[in-house]
Image (cartoon, rainbow, N blue to C red):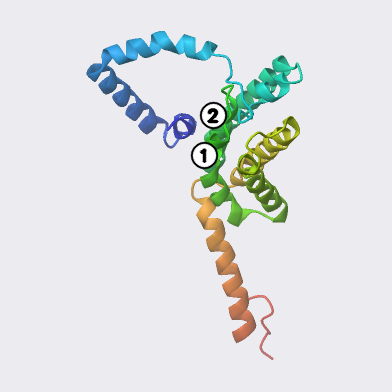
């Protein structure tokens, strides 16, 4: 829900509906279980102070760079990616580029925390499915490489640092690729682009088969 809420709050079309629904939900939830909200607010600062979990299946920049003594750089990289993604989501939502905004919000959700397990990347699956038909061979190559990289935990139960760096780079490249690809389309343009392309192909085929349309390109003037 968070990756949908952020774009919805900054899209002019959905701002009022999203804000109203959010307030109603929070108010109803707080009325039903006020103690749960109070406990959550008390626990949240402690959660934010938790150190990243150590392990070869945590692909967060802070953990990978921390193994070479550069945890501070890793934290800065993760924060920079998350902040950039949030700003991108807001800008794209304001421009009604809904798919790109959702993709950017998803990237922020992945790189914001200090933990990035391989199973977290399942949220990229619908973005990859949506971007694939619209992509050229370059972006598809990145996506295929990422899918191959996701098999790393199955091939090597204890991946080395170099392998994990490859995994992280493939993940970052895929996040960038799907965001750039999906950001080109607005809410309805995504489907309309296929419709226009189909009509163009069918129109060209009809013109080739039945001859040029009257007054159209290639039509002959009467003698």
Question: 64 or 221, which is in the foreground?
Answer: 64
Q: Position of residue 160 (x, y in %)?
A: 72, 32
User: Circle 2 — which element?
Assistant: helix
In the image, what residue occupies the spot 53% across and 13% down? Answer: 50
- The image quarter in which residue 36 lies: top left
Q: Does dot 1 land on a helix, a strand or a loop?
A: helix
**Front-most of 160 and 118?**
160
Q: In this view, does 26 lie to the left or right of 218?
A: left
Q: Do the residues labelled 1 and 2 touch (CB within 8 Å)?
A: yes
Image vertical order of residue 182 relative to residue 79, above or below: below
Measuring from the top left, give residue 24's x and y in whole percent.
Answer: 29, 25
List x then y, in percent, for residue 199: 55, 68
User: Label 2 neighbourhood size at 10 Å, few (<14), some (14-19), many (20+)?
Assistant: some
Examine the rendering and report whether any part of residue 128 can be seen.
yes
**Marks 1 and 2, Cα distance to the nearest angstrom?**
10 Å
**Above/below status of 222 relative to 1:** below
Residue 109's disc number: 2
Identify residue for label 1.
Answer: 123
Q: How crowded is mark 1: few (under 14 residues within 10 Å), some or many (20 or more)?
A: some
| Farthest residue, direction left | 32
């Amino acid at each position: 829900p968070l990756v949908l809420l952020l774009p919805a709050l900054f899209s002019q079309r959905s701002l009022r509906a999203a804000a109203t629904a959010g307030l109603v939900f929070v108010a109803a939830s707080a009325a039903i279980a006020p103690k749960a909200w109070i406990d959550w607010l008390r626990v949240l600062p402690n959660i934010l102070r938790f150190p990243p979990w150590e392990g070869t299946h945590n692909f967060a920049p802070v953990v990978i760079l921390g193994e070479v003594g550069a945890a501070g750089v890793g934290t800065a990289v993760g924060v920079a990616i998350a902040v950039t993604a949030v700003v991108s989501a807001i800008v794209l939502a304001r421009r009604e580029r809904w798919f790109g905004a959702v993709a950017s919000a998803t990237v922020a959700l992945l790189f914001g925390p200090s933990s990035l397990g391989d199973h977290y990347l399942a949220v990229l699956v619908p973005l990859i499915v949506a971007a694939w038909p619209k992509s050229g061979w370059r972006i598809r190559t990145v996506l295929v490489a990422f899918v191959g990289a996701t098999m790393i935990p199955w091939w090597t139960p204890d991946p080395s640092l170099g392998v994990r760096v490859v995994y992280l780079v493939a993940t970052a490249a895929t996040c960038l690729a799907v965001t750039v690809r999906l950001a080109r389309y607005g809410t309805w343009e995504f489907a309309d682009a296929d419709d226009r392309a189909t009509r163009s192909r069918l129109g060209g085929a009809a013109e080739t088969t039945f001859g040029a349309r009257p007054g159209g390109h290639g039509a002959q003037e009467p003698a």
